[in-house]
Image (cartoon, rainbow, N blue to C red):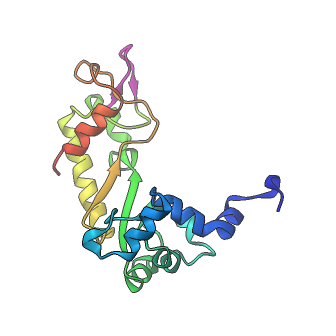
Amino acid sequence: MRPSSLTRRSFLKKSAWAVLAAACAAPRATLRASLDSSASERFFLTRGVVLVPNDLKGLDWPALAQQAGLTTLAMHGAAGPPEFPRACRAHGLQVEYEMHALSSLLPRSLFAQDPTCSVWTRTGSANWQHNCCVHSEKAVRIVCQNALKWAKDMRPTTGRYFFWTDDGQVMCRCEQCREFSDSDPGAAAERTRC
């Protein structure tokens, strides 16, 4: 197959083993020793790969992950098909869900009603498209309420939930947020207990 005709799907089909091994981020010798030793001696106790629902088409990821010695499969962006957790359980794999979800967890219509939830630019204008001001108690409360609703539908077997800020989008620069980097408000939001 010529490189110009290589699609994402054909790449995954031809190199699933390479993709899974690369996901472990360990030298092959370390990875092999880890797989051959007992769980308490393993270099990485959690070894996994993050998939989007479309990745499940045409490949049996739970079987491939088990053969590659992975412990966890994570879905990014959506819960995936209902049979996904069952297939993972049948192969002894943990399941997690990861998504950049702040725009979904906080309805954008709220910003018109309460501009204090908005992301503010350095020039003082509001940006209603992504993220929120992490210093807005109302915004954080609504995000937490909606995250708890989502958590009822998506049940990771590890007990870990990953609901992140909108990736690569502007963060708030209001008076309280201005001194922080783009990653600081995200870290502050992650420490918030719902």
Q: Residue at x 31, y 66 (%)?
A: 45
Q: Nearer the viewer, residue 42 or 150?
A: 42
Q: Is residue 21 above or below residue 194?
A: below
Q: Is residue 4 left or right of residue 55?
A: right
Was residue 86 drawn as part of the magenta stretch in this picture?
Answer: no
Percent from the top left, x then y, of residue 156?
31, 68
Is any part of residue 71 visible from this angle? no
- Quarter where residue 169 is shown: top left
Q: Residue furthest right?
A: 2
What is the chief secondary structure element of the magenta stretch?
Answer: loop
State the quadrant of the N terminus.
bottom right
Q: Residue at x 21, y 33 (%)?
A: 136
Was residue 123 drawn as part of the magenta stretch in this picture?
Answer: yes
Q: Residue at x 22, y 53 (%)?
A: 145
Is any part of residue 97 visible from this angle? yes
Q: Is residue 57 above or below residue 161?
A: below
Q: Residue at x 44, y 35 (%)?
A: 129
Region in magenta = 118-127
